Every structure is written in structure tokens, then in C-alpha cells.
Image (cartoon, rainbow, N blue to C red):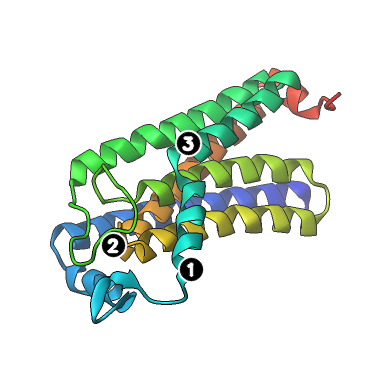
Amino acid sequence: MSTVDAAVTRLFGLLLLLGACFLGFIALSDEVSEGETQDVDERVLRMLRDPADPSVPRGPWWLAVSAEEVTALGGVTVLFLVTLAVCGYLLLARRYRTLLLVLVATLGGGLLNTLLKQLFSRPRPSVVPHLTEVMTQSFPSGHAMLSATVYLTLGALLAQLAERRRLKAYILGVALLLPGMVGMTRVYLGVHYPTDVLAGWVAGLAWALLTALVARALHRRSPALRAEARRPVE
């Protein structure tokens, strides 16, 4: 397969995945809005708690502590610090256009999540006590969506710097693993329904794919951006 054919295949794959995410989110949000998923959502939350005392999560004592620590990886504070550190590196490396893309991807993802939460206005789960503090609406999960947006965007940028396929696969694998772990902790802590987290993952992946496609188009049309990408980091 030629280089051009491979590039066209990758582009088609990205577009197909983006379309699947878009349709999947619409279908899931429709089911949630109609209450079709409520029974299953509540059943899953109850399964994760002691039947005699819903305030006690199943598993050893350290699991709840670990869940609170892992869930912070999707919090605004941690994601802000991670993004700030990456932006600082890009600024020092004089990758100004790449820096702008990172800011648009992360800030845009946060704005989109806020708009979606206000649009659906789904209350937080009340079937079990929350094991951590929450203040916003439930659908879609902000932790799941923002962690997917940030880690996948940064993972894709880092993967471009790796030459070997196994390194690229490792980087993207970690970028997928982190949002996955964050999302599962939100359900375990009782602050989100499973469908909230699933919707957050799908929306975050869709936004990361969209920004990647926009960056790809800008890269092809902008000689300055291509020159910046080829310039070695001092």
C-alpha cells in the first residue's frame, strides 16, 4: 500500500469512527432522556454497594481510597495542571501553532461538556450515597469526557513524535486507559450512572477526533504549520 493510500485509509477510518461516536451519543442520550436506561443504571450502582448498608462500597477498604485518587486524574485541577505543563513545553519549544491547537481542544471540550450538562440537566444518582463531592449535573460525565479529550489529544500529539509502532501503540494505549479508569471510578463512587460515563467517553473521543481532523486539515494547508512540525526540538 502506497503512502497516499495509507493516508486516505486513515482519514476514512477517522471519519467513520467520528460518525459512529456522533450517532452513538445521539442514540444513548435519547434513551437516557426517555428513562429507558434508568432501571439498569440504578441496578449497577446497587450492585457495587453492600446490600445491608448502601453507603459501604463492595471490595477491600483500599479500593475506595484508590478510586478517589484515580478519579482526580479526570478532575479540573489535575487536567488543568497537565495541560499547563504541556503548553509550557510547547511554548519553550516554540511550537506556537501546536500550542494553540491544544488550547482549542481542551478549552473547547470543557465548554462543550458544560453545554451538554445544561442541555440534558440529568440529576445525580440518588439511589446510593455519594462517596465524593459533586456540584454539577450528571449527563454526560465531565470527568470521563474531559479526561478522554485531554489525554487522547495529548496522546495523539506525543504519538506523532514516536517513530516505532509499538511506542505509538503504547502511548495511545495509556491515553485510552486513563479515561477508562477515571470513568469507572465515577460509577464506583456513586456520583454517575454508567450511561453518564459511557456518554462522556463517546463525546470526549468524538471531540478529540474532530480536533485531530481539523489539525490534519490545517497541517496540509499551512506551510508554516508543516515547517513547525518538522523543526527539531532544541
Residue designated by label 2 = 193
Q: Nearer the viewer, mark 3 or mark 1?
A: 1
Check disc 3 and report its element: helix, strand or loop: helix
In the image, residue 131 lies at what x, y percent? 33, 58
70 sits left or right of 39 in the view: right
Label 3, label 2: how far apart the Cα atoms are: 23 Å
Q: Nearer the viewer, mark 3 or mark 2?
A: 3
Check disc 1 and report its element: helix, strand or loop: helix
Residue 232, located in which quarter of the rendered image?
top right
Q: Amino acid at mark 1?
A: Leu
- The residue most toward the left is 34
The answer to whether residue 222 is above or below residue 200 is above
Crowding near the residue tagged with mark 3, few <14, some 14–19, many ≥20 C-alpha atoms within 10 Å: few
Q: Residue at x 60, y 52 (%)?
A: 175
Quadrant into which the C terminus falls: top right
Residue designated by label 3 = 77
Determine if residue 1 is in view.
Answer: no
Label 3, label 1: how far apart the Cα atoms are: 22 Å
Q: Earlier in the sequence, mark 3 or mark 2?
A: 3
Q: Amino acid at mark 2?
A: Tyr
Identify the disc placed on residue 63. Answer: 1
Q: Nearer the viewer, mark 1 or mark 2?
A: 1
Crowding near the residue tagged with mark 1, few <14, some 14–19, many ≥20 C-alpha atoms within 10 Å: some
205 sits left or right of 152 in the view: left
114 sits left or right of 73 in the view: left
Q: Residue at x 34, y 53 (%)?
A: 132
Q: Residue at x 65, y 31 (%)?
A: 86
